[in-house]
Image (tube, rainbow, N blue to C red):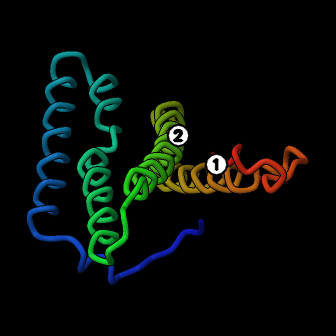
Amino acid sequence: MGIKFHLAALKTTTWWEHLIRFVFGGAITVIAGLIAKKYGPSAGGLFLAFPAIFPASATMLERHEREEKEEKGVAPGRRGCDAAALDARGAAMGSIGLMFFAVFVWRLLPNHSAWIIVEAGVLWLVASVALWLLRKYRHRLAGTSWRKNPSKIS
């Protein structure tokens, strides 16, 4: 599966789905602020890094995939769950990239200029793309072919 950008996908969501995402994101931000107030900015920052809209978007993605199949008269099967699982995999890779970002900023910002934020953003992008490529081409790196044992695709 490749990375694709489809503007037409914006038409498949409704205003209330965007509202749900906004509320989830706002709630996570408020909770992170309360944690930061009580336990300090380091603890609050960890919770702020939580992919705030992921819970809402995963359930919506599953529902959209299921409804799309049902409209075409096809039994949806596990397609919605599989799409949400792939979305979760991508969110996990992006979150690992965010950990690189956080450690980089935490260690270097006190003694360097604010340009460290830009450099940390590049590090996040490189780390996330590297993880995606590693996942995509892991069978080549291991010297095996997934075609020999398709049950090991994950």
Hey, which quadrant is residue 20 in on the image?
bottom left
The residue at the point 27 percent across, 51 percent down is 59
**Image coordinates for residue 42, horizontal then vertical, percent:** 34, 24
**Image coordinates for residue 63, horizontal then vertical, percent:** 26, 59
Q: Foreground residue, 129 or 63?
A: 63
**Residue that mark 1 sits on:** 131
The residue at the point 73 percent across, 51 percent down is 150
Q: Please tell me the numbered disc located at residue 92.
A: none
**Residue that mark 2 sits on:** 96
**Image coordinates for residue 127, horizontal then vertical, percent:** 61, 49
Dot 1: element: helix
**Outermost residue, right direction?**
143
Hey, which quadrant is residue 126 in on the image?
bottom right
Instruction: Give the residue type at disc 2.
Output: Ile
Q: Residues within 10 Å of mark 2 (few under 14, many from 20)?
A: some
Q: Foreground residue, 113 or 18?
A: 18
Q: Foreground residue, 5 or 43?
A: 5
Instruction: Give the residue type at disc 1.
Output: Leu
Q: Residues within 10 Å of mark 1 (few under 14, many from 20)?
A: some
**Left/right of residue 32 with respect to residue 7 in the rendered view:** left
Q: How many marks?
A: 2
The residue at the point 32 percent across, 56 percent down is 62
**Left/right of residue 53 with respect to residue 24 in the rendered view:** right
The residue at the point 50 percent across, 37 percent down is 99
Q: Do labels 1 and 2 touch, CB within 8 Å?
A: yes
**Image coordinates for residue 106, horizontal then vertical, percent:** 47, 32
Dot 2: element: helix
Q: Going from the N terminus, do you reach mark 1 or mark 2 first?
A: 2
